[in-house]
Amino acid sequence: MISPSVSALVDGEVYVPGLPADYLVDTYGIPADQISKLGSAENPHGTSPLARRAVEQVLDRMSIYPEWTSRQLREVIARRYGVTPESVVCGSGETEVIALVIRAYAGPGEPVLMHAPCFPLYRIFATMENRKPVYVPMGKDFNLEMDHYLEALASRPKIAFLTSPHNPSGQLVSEADVRRVCEAAHENTLVVLDEAYIHYSETEGSVHLLRN
């Protein structure tokens, strides 16, 4: 149950994460090997062997805080995607980075553009920070209605969120449409391309556009 004090901070429905696999096993008797939980960008194939080995190598140091700017991780990510380490921000999951972006780039009362429906934490964090969510409704078949999105950019939102694959429809935003949004956005509008689920697609995503 959500307490009244928490729900009072949020305009609209609160975010409810997907049910854990253990709950489905215990409640519905579904065998664990028949469950593939894809919500929250979780890996249905289990822990990466490379990640497991990396954790094992630092077990004796896990009681100590790491270097606070995540320098080593940022440097590795920067080399992987061909950007500078100063261009990389790390957080405790994508949701913290979304909160940081909204707090840093939009002031109180300023508009934050998003599709409707969309990943609810865009709206929740914007509302909690006293920013103004602005919605572009999707079509009746969950089409992204990119022409309407481009029209909404004329209002000069401080942040414009795009999600590819879109949550909850799963649709990819084409590179051509990403470019159209960036070209149409005002110079004071930050375009945020959220590709948290891109690894479920058969594409490399659009990080390469940062180098153009």
Image (spheres, grey):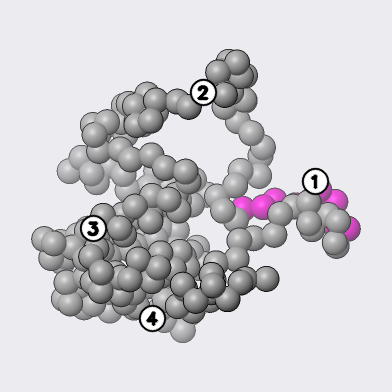
Q: Position of residue 66 (x, y in %)?
A: 45, 25
Horizontal arrangement in the rendering, residue 170 relative to residue 112 (left or right): right
Q: Mark 3 points at which residue?
A: 105
**As drawn, 38 above or below 123:** above
Corner quadrant of residue 189: bottom left
Contact? badges 2 and 4 (CB < 8 Å): no
Nearest-to-viewer mark from 3 and 1: 3
Nearest-to-viewer mark from 2 and 4: 2
- Amino acid type, callout 1: Asp
Contact? badges 2 and 1 (CB < 8 Å): no
* First reached walking from the N terminus: tag 4 or tag 1: 1
Of residues 87 and 3, the one drawn nearer to the viewer in this rendering:
3
Seen at 38% across and 56% down, the residue is 99
Which numbered marker is on residue 33? 1
Q: Distance between the residues labelled 2 and 1?
A: 36 Å
Q: Name the residue under label 2.
A: 64
Say which element carries label 2. Answer: loop
Magenta range is: 29-38
